[in-house]
Image: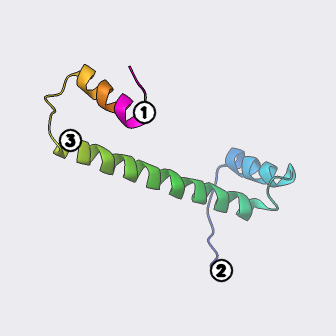
Amino acid sequence: MATMNISLPDQMKSWVEAQSINGRYSNASDYVRDLIRRDQVRSEKIANMQRLLDEARASGISDDTMDDIWKRVRTRAGIQE
């Protein structure tokens, strides 16, 4: 495992250290690794949402009315009107 040194303001350093003191993390490195993992997941979700938005924009504008769309949704869900 590689080592990385970072500089933090005193307030942030205290916060990181407190996360390991309260028992949720075994040390500051565990806390920072968890933050990075969460940020990676968040970034993947944002990228996926952007991809979906791009696909939606590229699909064009529908001529269907909202009633048409809801009927199609109800039919797919097996809901009778």
Q: Residue at x 50, y 50 (%)?
A: 42
Amino acid at pointer 3:
Arg
Q: Secondary structure at mark 3?
A: helix
46 left or right of 34 in image: left
State yes or no: discs 3 and 2 in contact (Cβ < 8 Å): no
Q: Nearer the viewer, residue 20 or 64?
A: 64
Q: Is residue 27 above or below residue 61?
A: below
Q: Is residue 37 above or below residue 78?
A: below
Q: Nearer the viewer, residue 75 or 57?
A: 75
Amino acid at pointer 1:
Gly
The label shown at residue 56 is none
Q: Residue at x 68, y 47 (%)?
A: 12
Residue 6 lies, in percent from the top left, at 61, 63
Q: Secondary structure at mark 2?
A: loop
Q: Is residue 67 above or below residue 9?
A: above
Residue 38 lies, in percent from the top left, at 59, 54
The label shown at residue 57 is 3
* First to last magenta residue range: 74-81
Real-space Cα distance between discs 3 and 2?
A: 43 Å
State yes or no: discs 1 and 3 in contact (Cβ < 8 Å): no
Total numbered labels:
3
Q: Nearer the viewer, mark 1 or mark 3?
A: 1
What residue does disc 2 label?
1
Which of the marked residues, 1 or 3, is nearer the chain's N terminus?
A: 3
20 left or right of 10 in image: right
Q: Residue at x 30, y 31 (%)?
A: 72
Callout 3 environment at 10 Å: few (<14), some (14 to 19), or many (20+)? few
Q: Name the quadrant of the C terminus.
A: top left
What residue does disc 1 label?
78
Amino acid at pointer 2:
Met
Which of the marked residues, 3 or 2, is nearer the chain's N terminus?
A: 2
Q: Nearer the viewer, mark 1 or mark 2?
A: 1
